[in-house]
Image (cartoon, coloured by chain):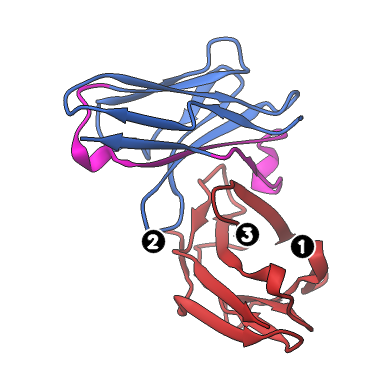
Chain colours: A red, B blue
């Protein structure tokens, strides 16, 4: 069975500082990994994905994530946080074998303080 | 706009009533997904369609829930004999072909269902 863990319910960071939102996953085979962001009263927006190739993936709004197979992690990072980055972030995984559903973590609320 | 749309945005109903939630996917997207999101949780998979057929309905919680996509575009999620535990935000997403799952999904704004 597939699963995703986002160990932090809330992450607080000062504006201008680097941010990290953690994600670990479990799949039987190899993973496809995704990050989505959810702003209040809006749908989830796609940020980035890891499919294959380079372990460092760059996405929208200056975000990036690093796939680490040995640690089964896919942490989201940004070098310099903005107040406008404050939102709810979801990590998701699916097994590359077969058409399995996308499984989401429970989300991490990021608060960037000016 | 060319995004995924969902109607209604809010639905309040009474326990035992029947509700229909509509999703209009991005034009050209053959894959369509329904999720349910409860407060403080991530989206939980319900069902997905490839074209007109339900490719996987393993996430539907029981037989009160049903979804259709008769022409391969718009989809309707139907809930019979609603219960208070059905209260949640129902999200719809679409993507290009399933393609082994590598395509990202585009989400609608959701329908907030409240069962009194």
- Residue A108 place in picture, x, y as percent: 51, 71
**Which residue in the structure is indicated by mark 3?**
A37
Q: How many marks?
A: 3
Q: Marks 1 and 3: which is nearer the front? A: 3
Residue A50: tell me if it is visible.
Answer: no
**Identity of the residue drawn at 76% across and 62% down:** A52
Residue position for label 1: A52
Q: Depth check: B27 or B1 in front?
A: B1
Q: Which mark is residue B40?
A: 2
Q: Which chain does the residue under circle 2 lie in?
A: B
The answer to which of B9 and A47 lies nearer the viewer is B9
Quick check: can you spot residue B104?
A: yes
Gap in angstroms between the C-alphas marked 1 and 2: 31 Å
Q: Are marks 1 and 2 in contact (CB under 8 Å)?
A: no
Please name the residue shown 57% across and 40% down the image: B109
Please, is residue B100 above or below residue A80 in the view? above
Q: Position of residue A30 (x, y in %)?
A: 61, 63
Q: Quadrant of the C terminus of chain B?
A: top left
Q: Chain of mark 1?
A: A
Which quadrant of the view contains residue B16?
top left
In the rendered image, the vertical position of residue A39 relative to residue B23, given as above or below: below
Q: Quadrant of residue A53?
A: bottom right
* Residue B37, above or below B8: below
Q: Nearer the viewer, residue A47 or B11?
A: B11
């Amino acid at each position: 069975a597939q699963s995703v863990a986002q160990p932090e319910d809330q992450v607080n960071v000062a504006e201008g500082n680097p941010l990290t939102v953690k994600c670990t996953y479990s799949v039987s085979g190899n993973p496809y990994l995704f990050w989505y962001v959810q702003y209040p009263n809006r749908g989830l927006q796609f940020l980035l994905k890891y499919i294959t190739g380079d372990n460092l993936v760059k996405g929208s709004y200056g975000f990036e994530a690093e796939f680490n197979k040995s640690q089964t992690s896919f942490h989201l990072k940004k070098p310099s946080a903005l107040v406008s980055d404050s939102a709810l972030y979801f990590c998701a995984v699916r097994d590359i074998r077969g058409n399995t559903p996308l499984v989401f973590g429970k989300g991490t609320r990021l608060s960037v303080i000016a | 706009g060319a995004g995924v749309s969902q109607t209604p945005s809010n639905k309040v109903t009474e326990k035992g009533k029947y509700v229909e939630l509509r999703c209009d996917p991005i034009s050209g997207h053959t894959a369509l997904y329904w999720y349910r999101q409860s407060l403080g949780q991530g989206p939980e998979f319900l069902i997905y369609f490839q074209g007109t057929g339900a490719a996987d309905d393993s996430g539907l919680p029981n037989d009160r829930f049903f979804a259709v996509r008769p022409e391969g575009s718009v989809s309707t999620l139907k809930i019979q004999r609603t219960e208070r535990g059905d209260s949640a935000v129902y999200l719809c997403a679409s993507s290009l072909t399933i393609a082994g799952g590598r395509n990202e999904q585009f989400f609608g704004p959701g329908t907030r269902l409240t069962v009194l």
